[in-house]
Amino acid sequence: MMETLIVALTTLLLLRMAGALGARRFDAWPTCGAYALGVMLIMTGTTHFLPEAFAGSPAPTHADFLPMVPPFVPFPGPMIYLTGVLELLGAAGLFLARTRRPAGLGLAALFVVMLPANIYVAVSDVPFNGAPATPLWARIPEQALYIGVALWAAGVLRFPRRDGRDLCSHADSTPNHRAA
């Protein structure tokens, strides 16, 4: 799971740097956060569909996700496909200013629903893609971070600055900025 966090953080910083250098679309942190989460979700969502022929590659396959599904969840194979579809739809929604709020809210809900699977994997010591299970102390904060970023991108979480201006204002929602 650390790879997904690295992808998200690197994307966030590169996009914000582009914004600081004049790319107006990326001159607000929440917009960059939305895009970074979207990029990460494209990476993770597509792996839900990788066939067994990709086994042994750095990317996990559909089969790698099967042991992660808790026993109480019915139809594990289709559920993996469903979560992949929802991740990809959520990513697409984050890239458009007009759909960012519902996408962020939907993704936050998805991440909450997926939390029991992350807990199950950690406490049951389920390996993933040939690597040992990520410990619970790392999985829970990372999942909470993704929930927070989804809510931040949706405009639900806001962080006021000391000067009273909102650090999280969405630049692409003002008339002076082009829609993302």
Image (cartoon, rainbow, N blue to C red):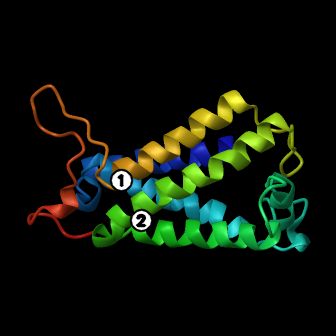
User: x and y percent of residue 3 in the render?
Assistant: 66, 46
Q: Which residue is nearer to you in this view: 121 or 24?
A: 121
Find numbered disc 2 in the image and state the secondary structure of the residue it sits on: helix
Q: Which residue is at a point 41% across and 58% down the rendered structure image?
A: 105
- In the rendered structure, which disc, 2 or 1, sits on the residue that comes first in sequence? 2
In this rendering, position of residue 84 left or right of residue 68: left
In this rendering, position of residue 2 left or right of residue 62: left
Q: Which residue is at a point 65% across and 60% down the rendered structure image?
A: 44
Residue 121 in view here: yes
Find numbered disc 1 in the image and state the secondary structure of the residue it sits on: helix
Q: Quadrant of residue 141?
A: top right
If the image is split into quadrants, where does the N terminus sit? top right
Q: Which tag is nearer the camera, tag 2 or tag 1?
A: 2
- The residue tagged 2 is 103
Q: Is residue 126 above or below residue 18?
A: above
- Residue type, label 2: Ala
Q: Which residue is at a point 37% across and 65% down the rendered structure image?
A: 102
Q: Which residue is at a point 33% across and 62% down the rendered structure image?
A: 101
Q: Quadrant of residue 168?
A: top left
Residue 153 shows which numbered tag?
1
Task: Give the Cα distance between marks 2 and 1.
Answer: 9 Å
If the image is split into quadrants, where does the C terminus sit? bottom left
